[in-house]
Amino acid sequence: MNALLLALALGAQLQQPTTIPEMWGAWCARCHAQDGTGKIKEPTVTVEPMDFTDCKLATSEADADWERAIAKGGPGVGLSPQMPGFEDSLTPEQIRGFVSYMHGFCKEKGWPRGNANFPRPIITEKAFPEDEFLILPAISHEKEVEFVGLYEQRLGKRSMFEIAVPLVSAPGSPRYNGLGDLELSFKHTIVAGQSASGAPHIVAAGVEARMPNGNFEKGAGEGSLIFEPFISAGTMLGNFYLQTQFKVEFPTNREHAERAVLYNAYIGRDTSLSPQTWTIGAEFNGENHEYAITPQVRKGLTGTGALAAAVGATIPINERQERGVRWVGYLLWEYLEPWRARR
Amino acid sequence: MGRVLALGILGTLACAQVIAGQATGSITGVVTTTAKGAPPIRVTIDQNVCGTELPDEAIVVDAQGHLANSVISVVGLTSSVPRDPVITNERCRFGPRVQLMRPKSSVRTTSRDPILHTTQAQEASGRSIFNVALPMPGLNIARPIGAAGVVRLSCNTHPWMRGWMIVTDEAAAVSGADGRFTIDTVPPGTYEARVWHESLKGAPQKITVVAGKPTEINFSLK
């Protein structure tokens, strides 16, 4: 009888939390701290949890990834197995509530949400600012081989700069191997949000400057300083990513390079929710009156998806004899993300 | 005629049971140690549920040296005894501390505590098999475990909590609080019996089982 009274008293003392903030306090705060910083006086896990007040960190991934982390636990997104899965104890609505609550730890306005951080197409430049390092190989039907090393770094909440260093192996007798035209680029996110239907959207504008350092005579450079203002945009249509880019090239030396209008559009979708998913898509690529399509596949190579690769083929739609197929792809590293989890 | 047939069937069944009973023996014995148990664990988290002190169950030994939670198994002898393991989080301990389960089967985990527990299962290599949250009492969550081996259980919110699943198809038993164990239905023959304990070690022993009676074997662990 005394044991029953004790149990009843204990039950009354320890009422189960019912709201998301109460649940956060009773459960999540045990590792992630009441304030979301992950800093605990007496930690019971060996891996330091993410700091959700770090806006860059807390806003750069899609809600679906955070929901998966809560439902499946750390391994669901390639992170530590010390984060347990809650899929058997919480409803999908509650899990979404936790993600929304977690976003509240970032107190600064203006950070574009990761829902608009779509997978990168091979040619169409995405609108979301990234911290990435890429290697983009390309092989044309004329055996011209190009490797572009690309470094991207976010600046503040919505901007990014980029440096592209191409290495070119151009056909000829003898074959020319050397540096191609260096490119510097700046981009700023103008609009980022969510439509009434829930589809995320993002628009960015920027400008690239291509240097005339490559060997023009050997086919490894344009022989002109070229300014390339562009607009990139992205949204989702159901489960499909839609990304577009419109760019104009203004050469300063019109004897070597022509003014050109470039327009790219990408449609693709993931085959699963895992960061290691295959993403299947295709691009329409236009430059003045030359058109091509680039079917492609992309795959996350590590549990977190911080390392990814894509491969595709740019197939001309018109003037097919002269242009031929160009094999393209990339190896991408999100250098601020952990690429494998600690135990 | 019908009565004769029924009697015949009953007689055959009875004979078969006798033959089956005589055809097997059992292994029984006691596990002992000279090692001492560790002092209680001081609890600083969730004291309203866990209390302020919990026994350290890494070595559970009585005053006579009888050792609990040892697993004795018969090498190469497959057992068909049903195993339905349940891991219960109760008063910030896993119950039972050590239990048997079969490879490629499921284990159920539940909680009776009104606080967040997690049940994380890891292989000996440290690879995580699963980690599920049990934030409220009464949940029942089943998870598969694949290969044979020793699986370590832990709780990410209460670091002292420890449990073990011995995943095997072999005939096996866990020693009780008095150190005793029994493995039934062992066909006559000579076997090797092994002992496992989470923090002590003991040598394997040869044992010859005869039909119709228990064969005694004792283990001393260090």
Image (tube, rainbow, N blue to C red):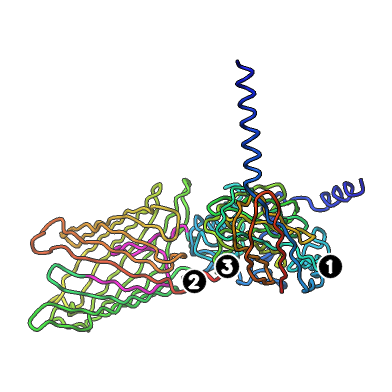
Q: Nearer the viewer, residue A222 or A307?
A: A307
Q: Check disc 2 and report its element: helix, strand or loop.
A: loop
> Which is the main secondary structure of the residues drawn in magenta?
loop
**What residue is pinned by disc 3?**
B124
What segment carries the magenta color?
A: A115-138
Q: Quadrant of residue B123?
A: bottom right
Three-letter amino acid code of the residue under disc 3: Ala
Residue B196 shown in magenta? no
Are labels 3 and 1 on one chain? yes
Q: Which mark is residue B64?
A: 1
Q: In the drawing, does residue A168 fall left or right of residue A340?
A: left
Whole-angstrom CA distance, mark 2 to mark 3, is 25 Å
Whole-angstrom CA distance, mark 2 to mark 1, is 53 Å
Residue A126 shown in magenta? yes
Q: Nearer the viewer, residue A108 or B124?
A: B124
Are labels 2 and 1 on one chain? no
Q: Chain of mark 2?
A: A
**What residue is pinned by disc 2?**
A338
Q: Quadrant of residue A335?
A: bottom left
> Horizontal and vertical percent for residue A146?
22, 75
Category of crowding for the residue at label 3, using alpha-carbon neighbours closer than 10 angstroms: few (below 14), some (14–19), many (at least 20): few
Q: Residue at x 15, y 81 (%)?
A: A216
Category of crowding for the residue at label 2, using alpha-carbon neighbours closer than 10 angstroms: few (below 14), some (14–19), many (at least 20): some
